[in-house]
C-alpha cells in the first residue's frame, strides 16, 4: 500500500470529536477513495460506501433524493445491516459532486447526527459554483493531490531515517554526499517519467516497464476527456476544453509557456475572455495547475494578480512526459544535451509547489523578463521568487537578477533549483538541488503566534 501523508489528517479527523463533515477534493485517479476507505474500515465497525457516479450508471437510487429522510430510507435499502449509531457508523459519499443537491444537504446531515459522514469529490470546484446553498459552516474542505516526490521516495523504500536526513540537510543548507545525491537525483528523474498518479506508481513498482506505465497514464488522460463531456452540456465547450488540454504539452515547449487565445481555434482576434468557462473547468477540475502573471510583485501576491494572463501546467509531470517522449526514457534519465527539459522541470516544480502553497504566480515584465514562480512567504511577509534550471548554466538568470534588484518590492531572498549537488548562497539568491523542492512550504506560524 502506498504511503500518503493525508492519511494521518483523515485519521485524526475521524478520531476527533469534530462533527463537521470532512470533504476531500482533488482530481480523478489520485487515490481519494482508496485512502478514505482504508482509514474508514480500520476505525469503524460499520462502514458504508456509496458512489454517486456508479449510482447514476446503475439503479439511480439516490439521483432524485431531495430530503434527508429520503436519503436515510434509500440508504437503508442498500446498506441497512451496516447502519447503527453515530458513534460506530461511517458513511462515505464518493463523487458527491455528481448529485449537487447533496452538497447543500450536508448541513442537515451534520445537524441530525444520525451517522458520521465523510465525502470526496473530483469536480467540486465546478459543482460548488452551481450549488444554491454551500454549507460553509458544516464542512471542512481538504485538498488532496497525487503522490509528491517525498511520497514517491517512500514508495521506493526510502525509510524515515533517510527522509529525516534529507530534511535536516535541507534545513541546515548542507549538500548531500555525492553518492546520496546521485541516488536521490536518479529517483527524481524516474519521478519525472512516472509522476504521482497512484496507479502509475504501482505499475512502475510492479513492472518497471515504461510501456505499461504509459498505458496507465493514457487511460487517465482519456478519462479526463470523458469527464469534460459528462459535466459540460455545451458541445462546443467540450471540444474547446479538450483542445486547450491537448495544447498544454506543446505550449510548454514555447518560450512563454502559456496558451494564447488565438491559437486555440487558430482564429485571429480571439481573446481569453472568450474561453473563461473552459479555463475554469480545466482549473476547477484539478486536471491542470494555474499560475497567474504578476508584473508588480508585492506581498500578498493575490492583490496584484493579472486575471487574464496565466500559464497552465498538467497536474502530473508523468502525464506530461508521456505526451512529450512517449516510451523514450533516455532524454530524462541520461540528460541528452540536444533536448531541453525546461518545461518538464518547470512542471514538476509547479506540481510540488501547488501541494505546498495555496496559489502559484510568475513574474512577467516586458522590460525585466520572466521568472518561473512567485509564492507568498508568510514567515518573512515577502514574495519568494523561484527559478528552475534544467541545464548546466544554472547561475545565468537575468530576469531573476533584474527582479531582485528592485528594492521597492522588498524581496528578502530567492531560490534557484537545478541538478547541481552543491548548496550555495550568492547575495540573496540560494542555489538548491531540485529535489529539495519537496521541502519548500509556506510554514504555519509557531503555536504561540496563533492566538490573539
Image (cartoon, helix red, strand yellow):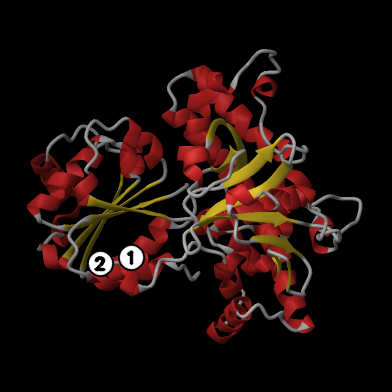
Q: Is residue 433 above or below residue 196?
A: below
User: In percent of the image, x 48 and y 33: which residue is there?
Assistant: 281
Q: CA distance from mark 1 to mark 2?
A: 6 Å
- Mark 1 touches mark 2? (CB < 8 Å): yes
In which quadrant of the rendered view does residue 331 lie? bottom right
Q: In the displayed image of the protein, which residue is found farthest to the right?
A: 338
Which residue does the numbered mark 1 point to in the structure image?
Answer: 10
Q: Secondary structure at mark 1?
A: helix
Q: Secondary structure at mark 2?
A: helix
- Place of residue 207 in the rendered image (x, y in percent of width and height, measured from the top left): 67, 66
Q: Nearer the viewer, residue 26 or 129?
A: 129
Dot 1 surroundings within 10 Å: few (below 14), some, or many (20 or more)?
Answer: many
Q: Nearer the viewer, residue 329 or 181?
A: 181
In which quadrant of the rendered view does residue 193 lie? bottom right
Q: Is residue 167 above or below residue 215?
A: below
- Place of residue 45 in the rendered image (x, y in percent of width and height, measured from the top left): 20, 70
User: In percent of the image, x 55 and y 69: which residue is there?
Assistant: 151
Which residue does the numbered mark 2 point to in the structure image?
Answer: 14
Question: Considering the image in quadrants, where does the C terminus appear?
Answer: bottom left
**50 with respect to 284 (left or right):** left
**296 with respect to 227 (left or right):** right
Amino acid at each position: 500500500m502506498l504511503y500518503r501523508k493525508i492519511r494521518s489528517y483523515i485519521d485524526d479527523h475521524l478520531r476527533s470529536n469534530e462533527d463537521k463533515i470532512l470533504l476531500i477534493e482533488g482530481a480523478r485517479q489520485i487515490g481519494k477513495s482508496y485512502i478514505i476507505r482504508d482509514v474508514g474500515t480500520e476505525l469503524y465497525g460499520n462502514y458504508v460506501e456509496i458512489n454517486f457516479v456508479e449510482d447514476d450508471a446503475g439503479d439511480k437510487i439516490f439521483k432524485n433524493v431531495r430530503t434527508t429522510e429520503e436519503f436515510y430510507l434509500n440508504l437503508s435499502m442498500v446498506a441497512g445491516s451496516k447502519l447503527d449509531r453515530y458513534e460506530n457508523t461511517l458513511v462515505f459519499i464518493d463523487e458527491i459532486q455528481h448529485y449537487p443537491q447533496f452538497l447543500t444537504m450536508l448541513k442537515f446531515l451534520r445537524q441530525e447526527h444520525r451517522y458520521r459522514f465523510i465525502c470526496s469529490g473530483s469536480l467540486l470546484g465546478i459543482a460548488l459554483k452551481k450549488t444554491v446553498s454551500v454549507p460553509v459552516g458544516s464542512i471542512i474542505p481538504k485538498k488532496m493531490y497525487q503522490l509528491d516526490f517525498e511520497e514517491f521516495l517512500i514508495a521506493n523504500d526510502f525509510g524515515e531515517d533517510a527522509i529525516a536526513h534529507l530534511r535536516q540537510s535541507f534545513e541546515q543548507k548542507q549538500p548531500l554526499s555525492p553518492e546520496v545525491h546521485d541516488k536521490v537525483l536518479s529517483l527524481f528523474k524516474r519521478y519525472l517519467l512516472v509522476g504521482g498518479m497512484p496507479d502509475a506508481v504501482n505499475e512502475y513498482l510492479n513492472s518497471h516497464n515504461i510501456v505499461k506505465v504509459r498505458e496507465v497514464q493514457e487511460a487517465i488522460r482519456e478519462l479526463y476527456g470523458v469527464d469534460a463531456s459528462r459535466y459540460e452540456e455545451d458541445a462546443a465547450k467540450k471540444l474547446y476544453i479538450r483542445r486547450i488540454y491537448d495544447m498544454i504539452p506543446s505550449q510548454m515547449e514555447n518560450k512563454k509557456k502559456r496558451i494564447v487565445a488565438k491559437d486555440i481555434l487558430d482564429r485571429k482576434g480571439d481573446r481569453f475572455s472568450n474561453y473563461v468557462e473552459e479555463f475554469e473547468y480545466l482549473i476547477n477540475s484539478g486536471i491542470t495547475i494555474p499560475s497567474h502573471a504578476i508584473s508588480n510583485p508585492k506581498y500578498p501576491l493575490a492583490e496584484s494578480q493579472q486575471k487574464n494572463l496565466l500559464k497552465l501546467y498538467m497536474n502530473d509531470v508523468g502525464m506530461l512526459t508521456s505526451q512529450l517522449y512517449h516510451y523514450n526514457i533516455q532524454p530524462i534519465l541520461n540528460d541528452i544535451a540536444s533536448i531541453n527539459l525546461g518545461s518538464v522541470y518547470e512542471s514538476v516544480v509547479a506540481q510540488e509547489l501547488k501541494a505546498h502553497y495555496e496559489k502559484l504566480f510568475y513574474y512577467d515584465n516586458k522590460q525585466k523578463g520572466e521568472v518561473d514562480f512567485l509564492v507568498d512567504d508568510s514567515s518573512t511577509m515577502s514574495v519568494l521568487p523561484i527559478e528552475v534550471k534544467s541545464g548546466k548554466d544554472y547561475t545565468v538568470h537575468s530576469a531573476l537578477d533584474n527582479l531582485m534588484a528592485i528594492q521597492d518590492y522588498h524581496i528578502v531572498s530567492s531560490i534557484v533549483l537545478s541538478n547541481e549537488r552543491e548548496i550555495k548562497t550568492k547575495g540573496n539568491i540560494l542555489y538548491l538541488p531540485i529535489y529539495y523542492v519537496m521541502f519548500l512550504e509556506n510554514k504555519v506560524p509557531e503555536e504561540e503566534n496563533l492566538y490573539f
